[in-house]
Image (cartoon, grey):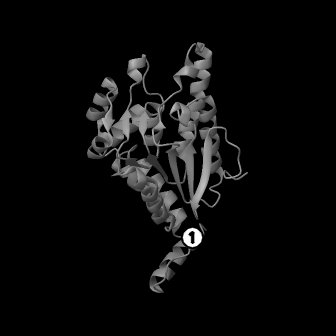
Amino acid sequence: MSIFEADFETLVVSQPAEHIAVVTLNRPHVRNALNTAMMTDLRDIFQSLYVSQQGIRALVLTGEGDKAFCAGGDLKQRNNMSLSQWQQQHAVLEQAVQALMSCPLPVVAAVNGDCMGGGLELALCCDFIYAAESARFAMPEGKLGIMPGAAGTQNLPRAVGSRRASELIMTGRIFSADRAFEWQMVNEVVGAQDLMPSVIEVCTEIAALGPLSVAQIKSSIRMATQVDHTTGYAFEIAAYNRLIPTKDREEGIAAFNEKRAAVFKGE
């Protein structure tokens, strides 16, 4: 079943342009907080996209409303949970995070408001982040006697460096979109009204590239932060060589020489 046809309890999926999908966290009455249903929906949608990209070439993850991208875990639901219930719920979140990070499509976070705790961790799982000027960020889990558990201690240091990440996670302090941009966690800060148009514009640029190329580029960049330079370069060459026999590579070269736009089919 297509993600556009699926009945998600906590997500809205739309297609603003050809080859582009927008996944919206849709619990605005609780600032799009992550409950078990949302964790399950996120797991299911990204696992589905791992199996089949369904004609999508770029994906946006955002939150409903203008107050919050995602406020983090739904603490009201977690109140009085038993140990086993907490662990079972977190196992679903772990699956969702793994599915998001493994998604072969480029995923852009459009942070439209507060982005806290697990919400920031979700944004950091994306390939890059655009934020509204009013967006605020924090990882306050330590104030609750816990810690980030959705790859936050892995992805934030990769984004801002280990010293800055240590400061932010160990204090739980809130920081602005401008600070996030200064620290290179956020790629672009724009007015709230310009957020989605800006993200759709960059996704349109991505969607114009060869989809097989983008998938290999994403894999190679991800590998760069996990292995030494020599191993990473070997991975890059292997990824490069996968593209040589494709019809898209032939089309790209032909289009260049014929001075026309390439028509890529992902073949």
| Point 54% across, 63% down: residue | 212
**Residue 242 visible at all:** no
**Residue sticking out furthest to the bottom:** 258
Decide: few, some or many residues near mark 1? Use Cα within 10 Å; few <14, some 14-19, many ≥20: some
Q: Quadrant of residue 146?
A: top left
**Residue 37 visible at all:** yes
Q: Quadrant of the C terminus?
A: bottom right
Q: Position of residue 47 (x, y in %)?
A: 63, 44
Q: Position of residue 63 (x, y in %)?
A: 51, 42
| Point 47% across, 63% down: residue | 206
Image check: 228 left or right of 27? Answer: left
Residue on which the image places disc 1: 246
Q: Position of residue 101 (x, y in %)?
A: 51, 43
| Point 53% across, 31% down: residue | 30
- SS under mark 1: loop
**Residue sticking out furthest to the right:** 1
Asked if 197 appears above or below 23 in the picture, the reply is: below
Residue type indicated by callout 1: Thr
Closer-to-camera residue (223/171): 171
Image check: 206 left or right of 45? Answer: left
